[in-house]
Image (spheres, rainbow, N blue to C red):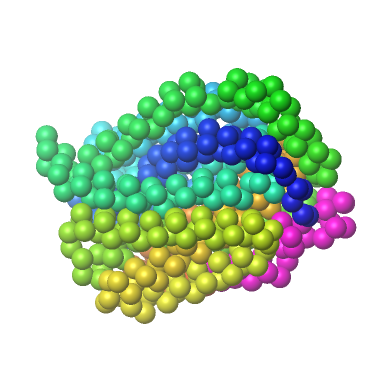
């Protein structure tokens, strides 16, 4: 599937759309990601303060994705029905409130008589329910504006919010914990959850005021610009299929994409939920220093991932770029376990692993959009993301369990890296062009 030629006027229109949408959407995703993974910084002191084990933390960090899995598909279908503005704002309000309640884990355990571990699990599960549909909802929203051949670069900018959540969030998290610990009788990690929950509520207001539900509502575009954007989407829609849910879930391509994403996510969230702890184990003791080192690692990952994704889109070759990125990222993650006593070698390997994960995911998300349209793409993106994100439960829980059993993170990190390598192999062996398995399978909806 080749990209259609585009003149300079068309490029200017899409550049205008990108400038209008991507910085704001990426900022929203950054806020969501901070609230999802700031538990990795809270962990540095929270486990001792609440008497929790590594395995309990791993289960709680990952159970977020069980709630996410259960409510992802209905959330995305609701967005398709009621409109992006209202639904994305609703998601941000609910996750902000639940994230702030994480600060009350110990208090809620005392009030309810439940164990601390149980309350932690419940809050993480509720956070997953609250945030369900945000990322696939934004992906669906991009499908309302961009044809599939233009989506990879947009998704790369969106996914750059993941590492930027650490670039900005890591030093801020470290500073909050270092500055506010003990203030008004609250632990440092309690202040972390409370202060970092507030931006989600503020951005929810911004979503209602700033976003449009689609091209027809974009008063900031001229009539001719809106017509051009709609014509491009109509032209591409002729080559895609709007399947019923039954037909959609019978597609072999859908389950292949889901398996690939599951394997990538297992490695990526192993990094995200454990990187501060991995750095701490190399001998770094200051929480603020850990924050800055984490930020540097993710900054490099963000920049390199955007550049590689841009190169892949310009060359119109995503399959091998995605496969190589996943394989190299996984191998680097496994190799990082060999340098557990050297901070900078460990950080170098994990940075390469994070870059590989980001590149493979940003390219991967253009695959489903090349096959589906309408409600089919809404359901397909949600299904892939929800099932695939169970890797965010399996990976941290597996790493936590192996760490408790063996007294070391080395084996668990190696296993998670291996999953990413397998994902790269699957992409190379089965995904052609933009994820269309074959001309025949595309035509028959297999």
Q: Is residue 383 visible?
A: no
Taking the view exactly as shown, the residue that stands out farthest to the front is 8
Q: Residue 249: where, in percent of width, then height?
A: 74, 47
Q: Residue at x 27, y 71 (%)?
A: 343
Report whether 314 appears left or right of 341. right
Q: Quadrant of residue 197?
A: top left
Residue 306 in the image: state x and y as whole percent.
51, 55
Residue at left offset 49%, top offset 31%: 91
The residue segment tinted magenta is 420-446
* x and y, in percent, of residue 183 in the image: 12, 38
Q: Main secondary structure of the magenta part?
A: helix
- 276 w.r.t. 28: above or below: below
Whether residue 310 is visible to the viewer of this picture, yes or no, is yes
Q: Is residue 4 left or right of residue 388?
A: right
Nearest the camera: 359 or 113? 359
Q: Measuring from the top left, give residue 382's x and y in whole percent.
A: 62, 43
Q: Quadrant of residue 272?
A: bottom left
Say whether residue 113 is left or right of residue 10: left
Q: Is residue 23 above or below residue 206?
A: below
Relative to 409, does residue 200 appear above or below in the rendering?
above
Instruction: Tell me the quarter of the image containing the N terminus.
Output: bottom right
Q: Identify which residue is drawn at 38% across, 56% down.
A: 299
The residue located at (33%, 47%) in the rendering is: 168
């Amino acid at each position: 599937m080749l990209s259609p030629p585009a003149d300079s006027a068309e490029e200017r229109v899409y550049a205008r759309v990108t400038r209008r949408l991507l910085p704001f959407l990426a900022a929203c995703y950054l806020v969501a990601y901070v609230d999802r993974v700031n538990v990795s910084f809270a962990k540095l002191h929270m486990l001792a303060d609440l008497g929790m084990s590594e395995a309990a933390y791993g289960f709680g960090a990952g159970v977020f994705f069980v709630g996410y899995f259960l409510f992802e598909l209905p959330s995305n279908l609701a967005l398709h029905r009621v409109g992006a503005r209202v639904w994305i704002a609703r998601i941000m309000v609910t996750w902000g409130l639940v994230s702030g309640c994480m600060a009350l884990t110990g208090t809620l355990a005392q009030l309810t008589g439940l164990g601390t571990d149980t309350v932690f699990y419940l809050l993480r599960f509720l956070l997953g329910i609250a945030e369900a549909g945000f990322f696939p909802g934004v992906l669906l929203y991009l499908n309302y504006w961009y044809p599939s051949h233009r989506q990879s670069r947009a998704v790369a900018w969106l996914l750059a919010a993941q590492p930027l959540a650490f670039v900005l969030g890591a030093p801020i998290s470290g500073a909050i914990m270092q500055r506010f610990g003990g203030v008004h009788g609250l632990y440092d990690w309690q202040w972390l959850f409370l202060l970092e929950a507030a931006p989600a509520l503020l951005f929810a207001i911004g979503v209602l005021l700033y976003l449009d539900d689609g091209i027809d509502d974009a008063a900031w575009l001229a009539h001719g610009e809106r017509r051009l954007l709609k014509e491009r989407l109509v032209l591409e829609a002729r080559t895609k299929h709007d399947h019923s849910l039954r037909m959609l879930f019978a597609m072999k391509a859908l389950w292949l994409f889901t398996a690939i994403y599951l394997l990538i996510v297992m490695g990526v969230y192993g990094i995200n939920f454990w990187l501060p702890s991995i750095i701490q184990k190399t001998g770094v003791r200051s929480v603020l220093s850990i924050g800055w080192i984490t930020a540097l690692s993710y900054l490099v990952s963000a920049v390199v991932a955007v550049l590689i994704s841009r190169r892949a889109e310009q060359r119109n070759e995503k399959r091998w770029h995605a496969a190589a990125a996943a394989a190299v990222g996984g191998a680097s993650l496994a190799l990082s376990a060999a340098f557990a006593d050297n901070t900078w070698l460990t950080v170098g390997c994990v940075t390469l692993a994070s870059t590989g994960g980001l590149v493979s995911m940003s390219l991967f998300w253009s695959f489903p959009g090349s096959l589906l349209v309408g409600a089919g793409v809404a359901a397909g993106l949600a299904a892939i993301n929800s099932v695939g994100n169970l890797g965010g439960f399996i990976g941290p829980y597996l790493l936590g369990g192996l760490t408790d059993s063996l007294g070391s993170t080395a084996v668990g990190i190696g296993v998670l890296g291996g999953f990413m390598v397998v994902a790269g192999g699957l992409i190379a062996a089965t995904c052609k062009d933009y994820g269309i398995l074959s001309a025949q399978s595309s035509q028959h909806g297999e």
